[in-house]
């Protein structure tokens, strides 16, 4: 059995309670970066799940085409590959936008 542990994040301009670390002073800018990072991690896992779900929908058509030589399944595979290509381009653009919007490290 897998149990899920939830962590509550308290945000203030004075300090943030972090599990195991006590109070860590944070500026509002640091808080927004910290929260944005958590949101990006959740968002990235959602994107990964979207890709997994999309790929899972292809399985039956791959089996029908490659194992049973079903030509209609081949047409559906080509359509699915275009859908995967569009999703990949969308994620690539997001990644690039996120990279360019972050402040430079060490600056």
Image (cartoon, rainbow, N blue to C red):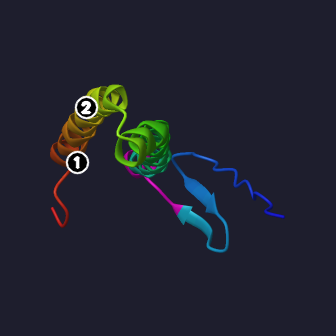
Nearest the viewer among 57 and 94 is 57
Residue 94's spot in the image, x, y percent?
25, 38
In the image, residue 30 sits, relative to residue 68, either above or below, namely below
Relative to 64, 103 lies left or right: left
Above or below residue 18? Residue 80 is: above
| Residue 18 locus on image (x, y percent) | 62, 63
* Disc 1 secondary structure class: loop
Categorize mark 2 by other alpha carbons within 10 Å: few (<14), some (14-19), many (20+). Answer: few
Q: Position of residue 38 (x, y in %)?
A: 49, 50
Q: Is residue 7 left or right of residue 104?
A: right
Q: Which residue is mark 2?
A: 78
Q: Residue 26 lies in magenta, yes or no? A: yes
Dot 1, crowdedness within 10 Å: few (<14), some or many (≥20)? few
Residue at 51%, 61% (x, y): give it. Answer: 25
Q: Which mark is residue 1?
A: none
As drawn, the label of residue 102 is: 1
Give the magenta-colored segment's residue range. Answer: 25-31
Dot 2 lies on which element?
helix
Say how many tags the image has: 2
User: Which of the 4 quarters of the picture holds residue 95?
Assistant: top left
Q: Residue at x 49, y 44 (%)?
A: 49
- Closest to the camera, between mark 2 and mark 1, is 2
């Amino acid at each position: 059995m897998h149990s899920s542990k939830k962590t509550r994040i308290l945000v203030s301009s004075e300090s943030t309670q972090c599990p195991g670390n006590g109070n860590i002073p944070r500026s509002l800018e640091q808080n927004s970066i910290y929260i944005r990072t958590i949101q990006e991690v959740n968002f990235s896992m959602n994107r990964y799940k979207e890709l997994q779900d999309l790929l899972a929908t292809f399985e039956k058509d791959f089996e029908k085409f490659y194992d049973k030589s079903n030509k209609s399944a081949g047409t559906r595979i080509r359509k699915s590959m275009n859908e995967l290509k569009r999703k990949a381009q969308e994620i690539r653009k997001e990644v690039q936008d996120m990279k360019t919007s972050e402040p430079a490290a060490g600056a």
